[in-house]
Image: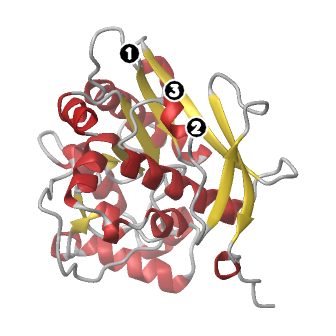
Amino acid sequence: LKARRSLASRYTTMILLLSPTKTLDESRMASPPKCVTQPRFAQGEAPMKSVLENLQKLSKPKLKSLLGVSDSLATLNHKRYSAFDDQPAKPCMWMYKGPAFQALSPQGFSEEAVEYAQGHVRILSGLYGLLRPCDEIKPYRIDMGKKLAIGDCKNLYEFWKPRIASVVSKDLVSPQNKPRIVVSCASNEYLKALDTSLLDDDIEVVQCAFQEPSGRSASVYAKRARGMMVRFAIEKQADSIEHLKEFQGYPDLETYKFSESKSTANTLVFVRQSCSGSSKPKPKPK
């Protein structure tokens, strides 16, 4: 383990991508991580500010239409953007609280785990572009797939693609002859923001797929499995695809098994084996 930690401190041969979540935990952290950082696209030329300014120009009805939300959520987010500088900031890995981040469970991470995550985990964002776990963010809501024009770019994909690809290529630092790998645990909506044709030629992109025994994907389980996979990689200090194939989930949530027969060179398929009674999704109220 010491050898692997030493290598991780010098090189980042693998990056894991996650989607953000709409639900946020804005409560104050009792013990913030030591490595609090600022989002890179909020600094310098600050492309994030271009997105923010375009959102701030929208009236509440237009923001509601863009986001596709209720009146109350439109009001909440219009207020957020109008007084954005006054909003409280929090490291993003602890701010997001959807199913993936609940399964990731960063509240229990050791300092060593946080350090690994900061180097190897990246979270895609419609507002911030690409985030490291300890990057401080403010409450917001804008999905990557929304058609918000920024300058000459027709949508957020066009705006963020070259910037995200450039930073991912720079963040992946590998010793000679060792592959550089991007592992996507992100949704298809957010993975589209990573233009693989703009990455350095030697970077391999592999996607994780989480299936039911029937072969289908159940959204509620898949979202949670993405967070569990990233948690597993952090705990294992993973730096290869072979490490990820050992993922078996967590007994208190769901268990998974890697399927060699269903997987391909670019897709790792894991089949759900079981789930605990407490983790089963609750039926929606009628």
Name the residue: 43% across, 46% down.
233
Q: Is residue 17 above or below residue 152?
A: below
Taking 126 as reference, is 12 left or right? Answer: left
Taking 262 as reference, is 169 left or right? Answer: left
Which of 18/42 is in front? Answer: 18
Residue pointed to by mark 3: 205
Q: Nearer the viewer, mark 3 or mark 1?
A: 3
Residue pointed to by mark 2: 245
Q: Is residue 47 visible?
A: yes
Taking the view exactly as shown, the residue that stands out farthest to the right is 214
Name the residue: 36% across, 77% down.
25
Residue pointed to by mark 1: 200
Q: Is residue 56 visible?
A: no
SS label for mark 3:
strand
In the picture, the quarter occupied by the N terminus is: top left
Which of 201/145 is in front? Answer: 201
SS label for mark 1:
loop
Which of 233/147 is in front? Answer: 233
Q: Position of residue 286 (x, y in %)?
A: 81, 91
User: Amino acid type of disc 2?
Assistant: Lys
User: Amino acid type of disc 1?
Assistant: Asp
